[in-house]
Amino acid sequence: MTISSEHDLKSMVQVGNVVKEALAAMQAAIRPGISSRELDAICGDIFARHGAVSAPFITYGAPVNAFISVNASIVHGLPTDDPLQPGDVVSLDVTPCLDGYIADAARTVIVPPASDLARRLVSCAETAFWKSLKVVRAGKPLSGIGKVVSREVTKQGFSVVAGLAGHGVGKAIHEAPEVLNVYHPRYNRPLKDNWVLAIEPMVAAGREHIAPQPDGWTINTQDGSLSAHYENTVIVRCGRPHVLTA
């Protein structure tokens, strides 16, 4: 999406605020024994309070308010009644639609107590995101985002998940352009003012390969290693990045 009016900007800020509220409430509720279905219900209550709906549900029929992925699940995990266990690595991916506008963000939270590996992995995904913003400038190549993300992830000894990427967002969940987490020269088109992007490093503790699951939604690491996901909706505004969901 490209922001073309003050109404567009105001609407994206509003839906971004719904994302922030939902993520904060879900993160605060995470503890041993709570189920991902209960976390999903918390998200749904906040959506309903604001008049928002789940964009994955209305777009793709996904049976979720939020995708919740645990341990080796990278993205698109479906809520279950299984209680979370100490040390579980839980990714929360929240994508509401409010008055026709969509924002998208994800956080990975560790159910205490956290292992050193899990802490480093979650920190790596977050650090890769924030470092990538240094190259989110109008006129800079889109490919620079992936270059920064992959450099940081590799430096920390982890793998960028293969085959999954960020994207444009705003009027639909997945819009052009695709925002890779690795460098590819084909993606050297310049960033433009008022573009809205979902930038989302997805990081594996082991190999980069993925394994789609039989439920048709969940995507796991192929080797069963832990994964982490950190995402925000970002507007390239006045030449610089404006993060709507953090």
Image: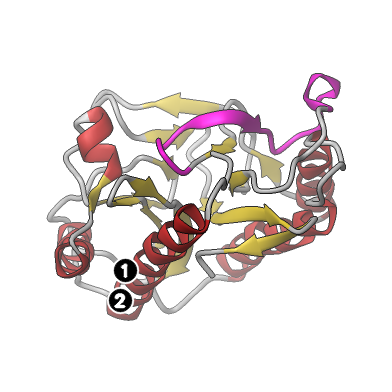
Q: As rendered, which of 201 and 84 lies closer to the eye?
A: 201
Q: How is the image coloured?
A: secondary structure
**Amino acid on which disc 1 is placed:** Ala
Residue 127: give x, y in percent of width and height.
Answer: 71, 63
Which residue is found at the position 75% from the left and 34% from the top? Answer: 182
Magenta span includes 244? no
Quarter of the figure with the N terminus:
top right
Which residue is found at the position 46% from the left and 64% from the top? Answer: 13
Circles 1 and 2, Cβ within 8 Å, touching? The answer is yes
Which residue corresponds to mark 2? 25
Which residue corresponds to mark 1? 22
**Amino acid on which disc 2 is placed:** Ala
Q: As rendered, which of 104 and 110 lies closer to the eye?
A: 104
Relative horizontal placement of residue 210, taking residue 41 as reference (left or right): right
**Residue at mark 1 to residue at mark 2: CA–CA distance:** 5 Å
Relative horizontal placement of residue 118, taking residue 125 as reference (left or right): left
What's drawn in magenta, residue-wise? 170-188
Visible in this render: residue 49? yes
Quarter of the figure with the C terminus:
bottom right
For residue 77, above or below residue 182: below
Which residue is found at the position 41% from the left and 39% from the top? Answer: 171
Residue 101: give x, y in percent of width and height.
Answer: 37, 48
Q: Secondary structure at mark 2?
A: helix
User: Quick one: which residue is furthest to the top in this view?
Assistant: 186
For residue 48, above or below residue 28: above
Image quadrant in which you'd find residue 18: bottom left
Q: Residues within 10 Å of mark 1 (few under 14, many from 20)?
A: many
Q: Secondary structure at mark 1?
A: helix
Visible in this render: residue 90? no
